[in-house]
Amino acid sequence: MKIIINQVSAEGLYLKEEVKSAQLDLKTDLIKFRSPLKLAARITRITNALTVDLNINAVIFADCSRCLSEFEWVFDKDVQLNYPLDSSDVFIDLKPSIREEIILDYPIKPLCSLNCKGLCVKCGKNKNEGGCNCGFT
Ligand SMILES: [Zn+2]
Ligand SMILES: [Zn+2]
């Protein structure tokens, strides 16, 4: 998402954009995206600075670190970004800030649910799906 500074009028500017996760380099071994991220921004300008009120919305897929099942969660975050302006600036690229805001919230150990029971240490069955027959309790 790029803001062309002279398009920001006194009333402010609204921008909506869908961005592919690859453009933001967001994929990791644990985290996947299957649809574009949705960005909505309200940009206001005071003399030497831009303020961007941004909403980032995305559906993220991850493998649970306990039971190894894939699950999805909806990432929804409101952030405010501030950019001091230089008279030579023509546009501002929000991409690095957006990437940072998302990655900051990545879980170190993703869990499909706080109550995830994980896998049976003996037979490997997913204990969220019921008891196993291996007799291990
Ligand atoms: Zn789990
Ligand atoms: Zn078992």
Image: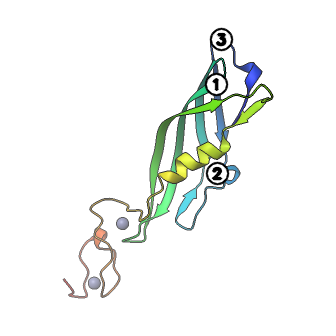
Relative to 98, is 46 above or below?
above
Q: Quadrant of ligand 2?
A: bottom left
The image quadrant that residue 134 belongs to is: bottom left
Q: Earlier in the sequence, mark 3 or mark 1?
A: 3
Labels 2, 3: front one:
3
Q: Earlier in the sequence, mark 2 or mark 3?
A: 3
Compared with residue 94, is residue 8 higher up or lower down, i.e. above or below?
above
Which marked residue is nearer to the observer: mark 2 or mark 1?
1
| Residue at image mark 2 | 21
* Alpha carbon separation for disc pair 2 and 3: 32 Å
Q: Could you say whether the residue bearing mark 3 is in a helix, strand or loop?
A: loop
**Relative vertical location of residue 77 with respect to residue 50 in this rendering, above or below:** below
Q: Quadrant of the C terminus?
A: bottom left
Circle 2 SS class: helix
Instruction: Identify the disc placed on residue 40.
Output: none
Q: Give the mark nearest the N terminus, 2 or 1.
A: 2
* Alpha carbon distance from label 3 to label 1: 13 Å
Tell me, yes or no, whether the two marked residues, 2 and 3, touch with CB atoms within 8 Å.
no
**Which residue is disc 3 drawn over?**
10
The N terminus: image quadrant:
top right
Pointer 2 with pointer 1, Cβ within 8 A? no
Q: Nearer the viewer, mark 3 or mark 1?
A: 1
Q: Is residue 105 left or right of residue 18?
A: left
> Residue 81: x and y, percent?
56, 34
Label 2 crowd bin: few (<14), some (14–19), many (20+), radius 10 Å:
some
Q: Under 8 Å from ligand 1: the CB of mark 3?
A: no
Residue at image point 50% right, 52% down: 104
| Residue ID at (70%, 28%) | 85
Which residue was labeled with disc 1? 49
Badge 1 crowding class, 10 Å Cα cut-off, few under 14, some 14 to 19, many 20 or more, is few
What is the x, y in percent for residue 79?
50, 36
